[in-house]
């Protein structure tokens, strides 16, 4: 249940369920690819994706997992010497490989001093039961969060953006993960082409039925070097790029219909300016969070307020 202090359940509240100390994610690039890039299920990748938009400088495939983590620790540890860390396998599909190879990478990360767990970003169609069984065993000694790129509940949109999987596959992966007692997260993009406001907001009702622990949201961004950038240039009328005020109102509507047990890690993402075509709001993440909170306060509302039977403490 939410208290008057919190208008929504944030990621720090989720982490407090597992840690009594401050923890920080360190991104790791382990050299993975994706099955819709290498031809297994498709070519070209997701139409919106340019991996350069979310790889920190210390992430480079020529560096080992250990080296990347040590460099990340040096960066964050200057401010918080007592910090503990989660190795965040972020770039591309981080469960796409032979099981023994995957184990070596994950266990190399966990062997680094002060690394207390893993966050693994992946696709719903790349988590065989044998791998989930391994994660379940790992979870007995270490924190493990599996984060699925779902992006939308619409199969029409999923096909349009070349995801290469259906929403039913995402539901199945999430449920199989949760059934093993493994914390599970999902990532959604709000404002994909062809999706109307109410369709976007209605996804919160669908998400709330799933056994999710965490959720990442971000606005649609048109990024240089992507197929979507060309599509936007050719068919811009089919895209609705929200103003910052519109997107904040959309997020507030979404939160009101989202179950309070789901912790929301973020609302926005910021691509590097040299890659970003639109929208360029010029707002930091914390500034956007305050804007959403302001809207919720003005409405006298909060996460889950529009859900039947939801009460605020």
Image: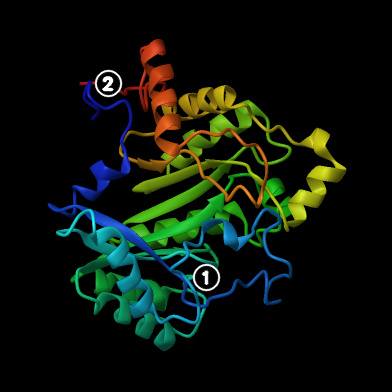
Give the residue pinned by disc 2: 311
- Of residues 55 and 143, the one nearer the viewer is 55
Q: Is residue 172 left or right of residue 229?
A: left
If the image is split into quadrants, where does the N terminus sit? top left
Give the mark count.
2
| Cα distance between the residues tagged 1 and 2 | 38 Å
Q: Name, please, the residue furthest toward the front.
A: 78
Q: Residues within 10 Å of mark 1 (few under 14, many from 20)?
A: some
Quarter residue 114 falls in = bottom left
Q: Is residue 182 left or right of residue 306?
A: left
Earlier in the chain: of badge 1 and badge 2, it is 1
Give the residue pinned by disc 1: 126
Task: Look at the image and tell me whether residue 181 can be seen.
Answer: yes
Residue 178 location in percent, x, y?
34, 57
Q: Which residue is drawn at 40% across and 76% down?
A: 131
Image height of 92 relative to 147, above or below:
below
- Of residues 95 and 244, the one nearer the viewer is 244
Q: Which residue is drawn at 62% across and 42% down?
A: 220
Q: Residue at x 51, y 26 (%)?
A: 248
Q: Residues within 10 Å of mark 2 (few under 14, many from 20)?
A: few
Residue 176 location in percent, x, y?
40, 62
């Amino acid at each position: 249940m939410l208290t008057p202090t919190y208008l929504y359940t944030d990621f720090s509240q989720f982490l407090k369920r597992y840690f009594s100390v401050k923890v920080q994610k360190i991104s790791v690039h382990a050299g993975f690819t994706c099955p819709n890039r290498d031809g297994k299920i498709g070519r070209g990748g997701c139409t919106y994706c340019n991996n350069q938009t979310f790889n920190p400088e210390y992430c480079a495939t020529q560096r080992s997992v250990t080296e990347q983590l040590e460099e990340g620790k040096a960066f964050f540890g200057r401010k918080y010497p007592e910090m503990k860390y989660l190795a965040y396998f972020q770039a591309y599909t981080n469960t796409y490989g032979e099981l023994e190879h995957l184990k070596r990478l994950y266990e190399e990360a966990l062997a680094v001093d002060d690394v207390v767990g893993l966050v693994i970003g992946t696709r719903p169609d790349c988590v065989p039961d044998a791998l989930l069984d391994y994660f379940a065993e790992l979870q007995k000694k270490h924190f493990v969060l599996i984060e699925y790129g779902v992006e939308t509940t619409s199969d029409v949109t999923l096909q349009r953006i070349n995801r290469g999987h259906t929403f039913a596959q995402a539901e199945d992966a999430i449920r199989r993960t949760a059934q093993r007692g493994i914390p599970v997260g999902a990532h959604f993009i709000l404002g994909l082409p062809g999706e109307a406001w109410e369709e976007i907001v209605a996804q919160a009702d669908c998400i709330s039925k799933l056994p999710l622990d965490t959720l990442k949201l971000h606005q649609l961004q048109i990024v240089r070097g992507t197929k979507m950038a060309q599509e936007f240039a050719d068919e811009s009328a089919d895209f609705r790029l929200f103003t910052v005020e519109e997107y904040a109102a959309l997020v507030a509507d979404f939160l009101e219909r989202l179950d309070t047990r789901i912790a929301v890690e973020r609302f926005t993402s910021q691509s590097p300016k040299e890659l970003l075509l639109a929208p360029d709001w010029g707002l930091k993440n914390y500034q956007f969070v305050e804007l959403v909170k302001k809207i919720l306060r003005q409405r006298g509302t909060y996460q889950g307020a529009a859900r039947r039977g939801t009460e605020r403490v």
